[in-house]
Amino acid sequence: MSQIRLRFAPSPTGYLHIGGARTALFNWLLAKKSGGIFILRIEDTDVARSTQESVDAILQGMEWLGLDWDEGPYYQSDNFPLYREHVDKLLAEGKAYRCYCTAEELEAKREKALAEGRKPKYDGTCRSLSDERGDAPFVVRFKSPEDGVTAFNDLIKGSISFNNEELDDLIIQRTDGTPIYNFVVVIDDASMGITTVIRGDDHINNTPRQILLYEALGYPVPQFAHVPMILGADKTRLSKRHGATSVMAYRDMGLLPEAMVNYLVRLGWSHGDDEIFSKEELIEKFTIEAVGKSAGVFNPDKLLWLNAHYIKTGNTDRLAGLLLPFLSERGVDPAVGGPPLSAVIKTLQERSKTMLEMADGALFYYTPELTYDEEAVAKHVKPETSDYLRQLVAALSDAPDFTHDPIEAVFKHVCSGLGIKMGQIGPAVRIALSGGTVSPSIYEVMEVLGKEEICRRLEVAIARFSGV
RNA sequence: GGUCCCAUCGUCUAGCGGUUAGGACACUGGCCUUUCACGUCGGUAACAGGGGUUCAAGUCCCCUUGGGAUCACCA
């Protein structure tokens, strides 16, 4: 069996969005699984709408997700001569013709047809024109068969068929001589030897036209696999109004790429009751047959849950690298001072859903002069609190081993000596250390911050609380 | 409107003729706990409707309904 060749072919008219990323992922997985070739092709035949920024954004998104390609990126704008040859070929063989109808005329006819409840299909005015009107502007149309059926067996959806009479003579070349998408994809997929086309199911309606073009051009028709759409909470196609749709926006929100990949693959694909998949497991277990047929609603909560999972189980050093930019945005640079970042992260891993949350949670470690949460102070600081803290500082200062368990032992000892419960001193200590009522366990925080800094923060608090 | 696709808990899904219809997210009750989380035990919650086929239908067929996509000199 020959090698499978797949491609992801985004048009550079915006960033890499969630849906595109999933399509790319499915292609990538299948290529990896079957030892095939994954090609990246930039569909920029619409020169006016294509931008370099978009190309860069798409490449960046692919890279972030770890979807590397074996060939490309190819640019369709590099292939205009090739497309022109194919147009000329079809023209010469009588499989295409020049159409002199103007865009305005067509538009008027279309609106009229729609208004009268008829289908807005090209009426074939120029189909059998024998004369060539000199240098009058024209488009080239493909002469589509007027009867018969075009069918294909979709790897995901099963068999799909269209009556050819539903298809009209599509334009394959614009007045300005540039080719059109449906024509170009066919030539590119054929010339790149694509064996399987995996794309969004919004392309199902284009497929019969493309099959007809493959046949007219004498190229073998590839297999198709149409992946269902991703919907918003209101069940309409996912778009900006549903929130962020750019893959990179999720990185900026503190998502991990492995969470994104895991989420995306599970949206529409499953493997029994399994939820967590590493890339390696995906490559092993992914099959296009197991992709579902129906559209799925994008669920940010589940994405977040997956993200929390990967943060919880992630390598601390790697997380540190990812956290740095978020800290920097908050004016914190662990290299300048404060506790080691990896120690800080260990206390935050199981309580952060995103890296952004983790950055916020890490702030107090690197803030020597804390601003206390006044409401918390009012609630938890009592007249005797300063005295308790003094005893705690004294006991802590003598602690020979300033790690979690010994610190806890000191704490308990101080409490029993004072005849109080943890709850009578804990909250105040937390405020002294972190400024508020939410933080990792105070024993952990103490170990991370170190004896000297802990005693200093406690002294500051004692001074501050004395007036209460 | 035409064409095409789709249909199990709120959401993602398992199920491939015989199940107390399973798992996950979310929600929720208990436990754990100095906070917030994590963890853990439990709970609420689904086969869109109607006809067939069959001894037997969530599973197969048809219709209805609902949702989505698409009908460009965009991709």
Image (spheres, coloured by chain):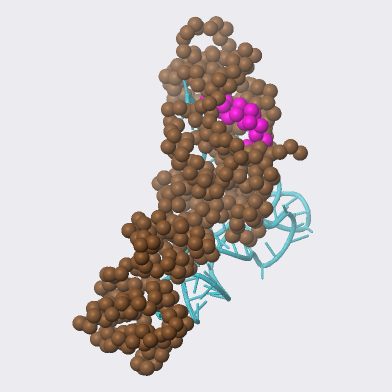
Q: Is residue A185 magenta?
A: yes
Q: Residue drawn at (62%, 60%), measured in percent from left and top?
A: A274
Q: How many marks?
A: 0
Q: Supply the letter of whichever chain is brown.
A: A
Q: Is residue A127 magenta?
A: no
Chain B visual colour:
cyan
Q: Is residue A160 visible?
A: no
Against A409, is A187 above or below? above
Q: State the image coordinates of residue A384 (x, y, percent, origin top left).
A: 27, 88
Q: Residue drawn at (28%, 70%), measured in percent from left and top?
A: A369
Q: State the image coordinates of residue A223 (x, y, percent, origin top left).
A: 67, 36
Q: Residue drawn at (60%, 37%), measured in percent from left and top?
A: A71
Q: On the image, which quarter does residue B35 sit in?
A: bottom left
Nearest to the observer: residue A19 or residue A310: A310
Q: State the image coordinates of residue A29 (x, y, percent, origin top left).
A: 62, 47
Nearest to the observer: residue A119 or residue B71: B71
Against B60, is A377 above or below? below
Q: In the rendered image, which quarter contains the C terminus of chain A?
A: bottom left
Nearest to the observer: residue A409 or residue A296: A409
Against A286, is A384 above or below? below
Residues shaded magenta:
A180-199
Q: Residue drawn at (69%, 44%), measured in percent from left and top?
A: A35
Q: State the image coordinates of residue A39 (x, y, percent, origin top left).
A: 60, 37
Q: Is residue A165 visible?
A: yes
Q: In the rendered image, which quarter contains the N terminus of chain A?
A: top right
